[in-house]
Image: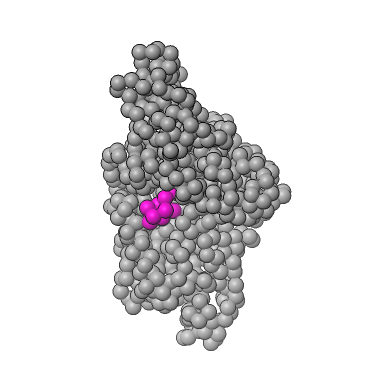
Amino acid sequence: MDAIKIKKAIQHRKLIDVLLDSTLYADLVLKGGYFINVITREIYEADVAVKGEYILMVGDASDLIGPKTTVENVKGKFVSPGFIDSHMHFESAMLTCTEFSKLSIPTGTTTLIGDPHEIGNVLGVQGMKAMIEEAKTLPNRILFTVPCAVPDAPGLETSGFDVSAKDMKDLLTDPYVQGIGEIQSFSNIKPVYEHAPELIDDLVAAVAYANSIGKTVEGNAPGLFGKELAAHIISGGTHVSCHETTTKEETVEKLRYGVSVFMREGSSQRNMAECIRAITEDGLDSRRAIVVSDDMVPADLLKYGHMNDIIRRTIAEGIDPVEAIQMATINPATHFGFKDVGVISPGKRADIAVISDLNEMKIDQVFLGGKKAAEKGELTIEIAPYIYPESVKKSIKRKPVKKEDLLIRATGSRARVRAIEAIPDQNLTGGKEYTLNVVEGIVQPCLKQDVLPVLVIERHGRTGKIGKTFLNGFDLKSGAIAESVAHDTHNIIVTGTNYEDMVTAVNRVIAMDGGIAMIKDSRVVGDLPLRIGGLMTDEFTGKEMSDKVEELSRLAKDELGCGIHVPFMHLSFWSLVTSPKWKITDMGLIDVNKFEIIPTIL
């Protein structure tokens, strides 16, 4: 028995003493509240008594109140287990685990399951380990599901490092690693099976090892049905999740197969309202329905909340409040096999959210391991800033580019071109064809048709390639935007109304060692350095980052005329080659469904 298990056994023995020895008392009693029982889906009046980190009992705790017991009067309020976000990326918030937690804890979220896929694509195992080490310093529980394949589509994109099954033993033995993350390399079943079967062999080996040591595996199955869905489930060891479900029909089939449907409701991708119809309309059991954020910007965390806001939106879709809370507590705990969180019952960790308004999910107090961590939206504990080592910074290996490097060329005076079609609030895309003017051999953007060049510049120093195509639906009126956040391999992605501003934007990102840059008339309109892997920053607090991202979004609209919601996050997903239909990488325009590079100029 290891030291952690011995310590827990000793603490549990003390709980028994407190319950049965009339001279011993609880450390904390939440008195007179409405208890939310996520096991039986009930609400009833009950006290909650806590000793140390653990729940003593739920019921009448009057006999457990002693002279040194802290009594919190929660009469008229609701006492719930702390919320769990089962799938999220710290990198998408551009925040360290520390700064994200400072914003998240006051909203009632006490457990985070982070997927360090993004930093893994840039810095490999080293980058993931750096993030895991940070999480070990924090009072909330943060676990990780790590990628077993980087890049997801070899030959179609270039990552900073490669990760495969051989790296799993080193990562999965860490107690802060919950298991394998979203298995995107087998999302496009038929193309991968036909063109890259070695990916399946490596995946199955990694999954088999993870399962053998009791680790979980998460899936990624957008638009899959029938045999393809079954194959994906089996590749994950028979029980997986999917956070890329976007339709009611997908939700129904996945729930029937036993897939845990992670109903995503983040800043730029919102699928819960469609997925929840399988429950509200078809009456399916909701035990495997779980709400997650996936990707959130700091401003949304501050303005709306975290899991509490997603639960509120779920209630607004017609779900009973307790059932909605189950989707962020006991349901994910069951999925991951957590033994000590997700419910409030004797011996469980005292991670608790006190709710003042159930339908609006207003959080009054938050307790982490029996200690008050937040009250009325503010932290009541100190969480020190965390500074990352220099080894995970300076990840941009690309020299500045020239205008000639970015030009899209064609012969004649007109060119028929392919363009990625943006779909707002989704990472799915379409594909269209357009006719554009050609001037001196250069294909010109067309604002009238809303067709702009979009390029991905390899920045890891491995190939130097530049992928080029066009984009429809970004609604940019002037200038250019570039960023080193471009899923999944995070090369530099840029789009703009003219090539001159695009060059300046790319070079600004390079000069900052990663980040976001907006250019208009060759001048910097706004920028944000992201020096940790070109993805995150430890230079600003969560509040400061919220203000900066809000300011960038305002400038994108006011200065560049960009009308799309959270433009930087949308732009970052147009290189995600595991999500249909067309995407752009440093290799070129990708037909995701065919798993191949296709020409931009027809």
Judge whether residue 300 is colored magenta. Answer: yes
> Which residues are drawn in magenta?
296-307
Judge whether residue 172 is colored magenta. Answer: no
Residue 396 falls left or right of residue 412: left
Does residue 180 appear in this view? no
* 120 or 315, nearer to the observer: 315
Residue for point 69% across, 43% down: 256
| Count of numbered circles in the view | 0
Residue for point 64% across, 38% down: 238
> Where's the N terminus, which quadrant?
top left
> Where's the C terminus, which quadrant?
bottom right
* 149 or 571, nearer to the observer: 571
Q: Give the quarter of the image for residue 134.
A: top left
* 199 or 131, nearer to the observer: 131
In the rendered image, residue 193, in percent from the top left (x then y), is placed at 66, 51
Does residue 35 appear in this view? yes
Residue for point 51% across, 84% down: 438
In the rendered image, residue 25, in percent from the top left (x then y), is placed at 36, 19
Up-down: is 47 above or below 107?
Answer: above
In the rendered image, residue 178, in percent from the top left (x then y), is placed at 49, 36
Colour scheme used in the picture?
A: one colour
Residue for point 55% across, 72% down: 419
Up-down: is 33 above or below 230?
Answer: above
